[in-house]
Every structure is written in C-alpha cells, then in structure tokens.
Image (tube, rainbow, N blue to C red):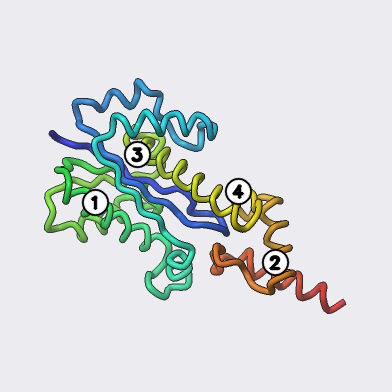
Amino acid sequence: MQLVAGIDEAGRGPMIGPMVMVLAGIDEKKYSVLADLGVKDSKLLSPTGREKLRKKLLEVLDIVVIRIISPEEIDSAVWGKRYTNLNQLELVVMVELIKEALKKKKLEKVFVDSPDPKPERFQEKIRDLLSSYRVEVVADNDADKKYPIVSAASIIAKTERDRIIERLKLEYGDFGSGYPSDPRTRQFAKEWLRRQGEPPPIARKSWKSWKKLLSEIKQRQLF
C-alpha cells in the first residue's frame, strides 16, 4: 500500500482556543474517491457540510493523526521563547505528525500547506528535519485548495477544532468564533477583562488584541 498524505491546520488566527493540525493519508489507488466525495477547502463548506464530510472521510482514509496545539504553546512561539515564531512551531508539529504516521504506515508523499510565503524554503526545512526518512515532502501555499488530501486534512482539523470550541463555550460562555474581528468575541473579552483583570486560561495572551482591549479598559477606568 502506497499512501499519499496531506497536512493542514485550523485556528491559526483566533485570540481564543487551540490550533489543530492534522495529517490525513490515503492509498494512492483510492485517491480519486476524495474528489468523488466533493472534498474541498474546509472554509468553503458549511459547518453541517464539514461534519458530514468528516464522517465519510474517516471511513475512507487509511491514517489520521491529530495534534492539538495549546494557547500556551502558541504564546511560546509568538513570544519567541520555545520557538522562533509561529511558522517554526508549525514546522516542528508537521515533522512530528509525519514521524508519528511513519511509525504506523509507509508514506510515499506528503503535501503540506506552507505558512511561509516562500513554500520552497519551508519545504527544505522540513526535508532537512526528515533527512533520515524516506518520504517525499511537497510544500505549497493554499495547498488546501490544490490537493484533495490536504483539503481532507483541513476538514478534519476544522471539525476537530469546532468541537473543542463548543466544549470550551460550555465552560466559559459564548465567545463567538474566537477571532479578533468577531464582535461577539470582542464583547466576551471586554467583559472578562473587566471582571478578572487578565485574559482567561483559554486565551492566546500573546495576541495584541488582548493587550489593546486591556489598555482601553484601564483608560476608561481613569475617567
């Protein structure tokens, strides 16, 4: 069995919650099944459509490896503590996913969605870290729109993160999508900061949005 795999993430931009990265792999002989299922970029699908496709994908894929990246890990990358930046964090996690998959299956080729605007540079970094492994890695921008197997990884990553977010809302209340541009998210953040004086445990404290909102609240309290 020769497997083709794809890697993509969900939740890179929000100020609340984790990022999820997924490796999805399928036998080359079944690759056309992905197109038959109507697999495409997860952002182009409705939440219901993503959930339906997720179920079908888990039936046909030969391997799925999921990694949840916590807000703390993300902060360590943005602040340059454990990683140089967020791109390096993604690089390290992608390599971890590939190594984990190789323990279970033989991968012929892996397509990854590059966060670097120069995908060939990102591709070389991955290849360097996998120099002792026999696997071909191809990095590309917007890979989730070009390669069905990356689209499949994108769908599973997005639905996995959606489920985590819904569980967090049961504990912390409705904070919307978690993106800084979402009015519901901003309202939640303001109310939390007024009550607690600091971001919640599920926040990415390195996001400038939190610092800005806290500064605005403190300014208003002076008058």
Q: Which residue is mark 3?
A: 150
- The residue that mark 1 highlights is 98
The amino acid type, in three-letter code, at marker 4 is: Ser
Mark 3–mark 2 CB contact (< 8 Å):
no
Which quarter shows the C terminus? bottom right
Name which of mark 4 and mark 3 comes first in the sequence: 3
Of mark 4 and mark 1, the one earlier in the sequence is 1
Residue at mark 3 to residue at mark 2: CA–CA distance: 36 Å
Q: Is residue 86 left or right of residue 170?
A: left
From the image, state whether disc 4 or disc 3 is nearer to you.
Answer: 4
Kind of residue indicated by mark 3: Val
Q: At 15% from the left edge and 35% from the top edge, which residue is drawn?
A: 2
Label 2 crowd (10 A; few <14 / some 14-19 / many >=20)? some
Q: Nearer the viewer, residue 112 or 197?
A: 197
In this view, 153 is above or below 77: above
Rounded to the nearest angstrom, the CA distance separating label 2 from label 1 is 39 Å
Residue 181 seen anywhere in this rendered image of the structure: no
Amino acid under label 1? Ile
> Mark 4: which secondary structure?
loop
Residue 175 in picture, x, y percent from top left: 64, 53
Label 1 near label 2: C-beta < 8 Å?
no
First in sequence, mark 3 or 2: give its number. 3
Which element type, helix, strand or loop, lies under badge 2? helix
Decide: few, some or many residues near mark 3? Use Cα within 10 Å; few <14, some 14-19, many ≥20.
many
Question: In the image, is 119 to the left or to the right of 50?
Answer: left
Mark 4 and mark 3 residues within 8 Å of each other at the beta carbon: no
Q: Quadrant of residue 212?
A: bottom right
CA gap, disc 2 and disc 4: 17 Å
Label 4 sits on residue: 177
